[in-house]
Amino acid sequence: MNPRPANSAMVNVCFLLLSVSLLQIAAACNREFNNTATVNSVDDSGGKNRTKDSLIDLLYGKGSLVKGPATLEDDPEFVGIPMDDFTEDVDDEPIVDDYPDDNNQAVTIPDENGNGDYYAKSIAKNARSARDVDLRKYDSPIKNQGSTKLCTSFATVAAIENKAKQKSGVELDLSERHMFSQYRSYSTPMAAKASTQSFVAEEKAWPLSQSSPLRQMDGRGVAKTAVLSKQLKTTSQMVAELQAGNPLIIGLGIRSPMLLRGAIMNKQGDAASIGHAMMAVGVFFDTKFANEGGGVLILKNSWGSKRGDGGYVYLPLNFCGSGRRCYAWAVRDVELLNVADNNSLSNNTNNNGEPSVRPLQAWPTVPQVSAGDLSVRIHYDGWAGSQQRFLLSLDGPQSALAAVASVSFRIHPTYGSNAVDTVNAGSGGFVTDVYQTSYRNWRTQGATVTTASGKRFELPGVLVNW
């Protein structure tokens, strides 16, 4: 009797079962890897194209895929910001919800100085014309801030991108890293104000994945906020700004769990001492939103397209106030610079009849530098008792120094926590602190130079000998 055919068949069966098992495991891992905030509670095909009727159906109707509320644990990449940091440099009190009072009262929108009426007319809260507003067609694609704390930058950049496309037809992809470098704080008011002070570069100049820019940033900015409202005071003012076509930079203290039915901000949950920033880009009114105060604001989030409703979430009209803190600013106008020609750029003018987009300007050439262009120098600075004082500096032509982002001078291990002295560009020159030693004829351990383009190279040390 020959046992080989039976054993071969058994091997084939075992291999087949093993293959099926591996496929099942892979599918399970894929489901776990792609698990998002209540993944089966919203239809990821919605988001930017969601109409009011489809939103109502998604949240309340037979088409709803609701399986339960989202929780913060369902958002593993979410990073909250302490409210003290989040509201640093805030000008005024949080927004007050005034919609339940008198729907016939006029809404006054102050100008950027807080005076008068910006639109030169009062706006009734129950105005029928263009009451629903949806500016998502001007949005750039949904982005993902990942594990960073850059939500204030993402919200601000999103508002500039939205207004830029409204105004000029140009779809920008701006750098949140570069925006954040303009204010270096987790504060929403500081982010909003910083957006008016300098032009933000494109993402390709400073990607989110890079802690340092890929090239010199001077002259690479393309867009900034030209007109920013004062801090808004009421829900009615937020709605009126949206009805005027102005996206909002909005920061709020979140509740736990953050989302209900996978997409609506929870106004009844436990109060949290952390904040999150998003961009408000529209508003829907309907009697079916009775529990939400009669309507919801459409917010563009920065947690990727798999979170919320295709990347968007909805803020109840009655969320702000009653102990729930919200702060908002409207981006009323933007200025564009260094933007390539588009269909109608030359025809766009601002309120003064001037071109809204400046002529294209040539970007400066990024200086090139190599190890042969630079060296480490030692400078003696007198005596401290029996010890010689000294400091180190980076030496080279100005054109080469201009291409350097930082230098890490390695002094000597015996200096402990001060053994390495890192000096960044913009600090008045690449010069270390003062050190002292009673020993001579020893050599520092070199330096690592990082250029503005992200390249690194090593320089030799210098001899300590007086």
Image (tube, rainbow, N blue to C red):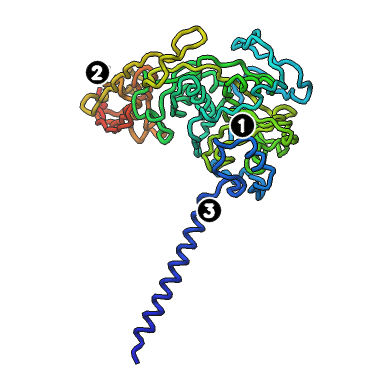
- Is disc 1 surrounded by few (<14), some (14 to 19) or many (20+) residues within 10 Å? many
Q: In this orientation, does residue 36 appear? A: yes
* Quarter-of-image position of residue 219: top left
Seen as rendered, the residue at the extreme front is: 129
Residue drawn at point x = 38 percent, y = 30 percent: 204
Residue drawn at point x = 49 percent, y = 62 percent: 24
- Is disc 2 surrounded by few (<14), some (14 to 19) or many (20+) residues within 10 Å? few
Residue 88: x %, y % from top left: 60, 23
* In the depicted structure, whether residue 113 falls above or below residue 93: above
Seen as rendered, the residue at the extreme right is: 101
Marking on residue 416: none
* In the depicted structure, whether residue 68 falls above or below residue 155: below
Q: Which residue in the protein does label 3 denote?
A: 32
Screen quadrant of the C terminus = top left
Check disc 1 and report its element: helix, strand or loop: strand
Earlier residue among tags 2 and 1: 1
Q: Are marks 1 and 3 in contact (CB under 8 Å)?
A: no
**Observer-nearest of 123 and 417:** 123
Q: Which residue in the protein does label 1 denote?
A: 298
Q: Which residue in the protein does label 2 denote?
A: 397
Check disc 2 and report its element: helix, strand or loop: loop
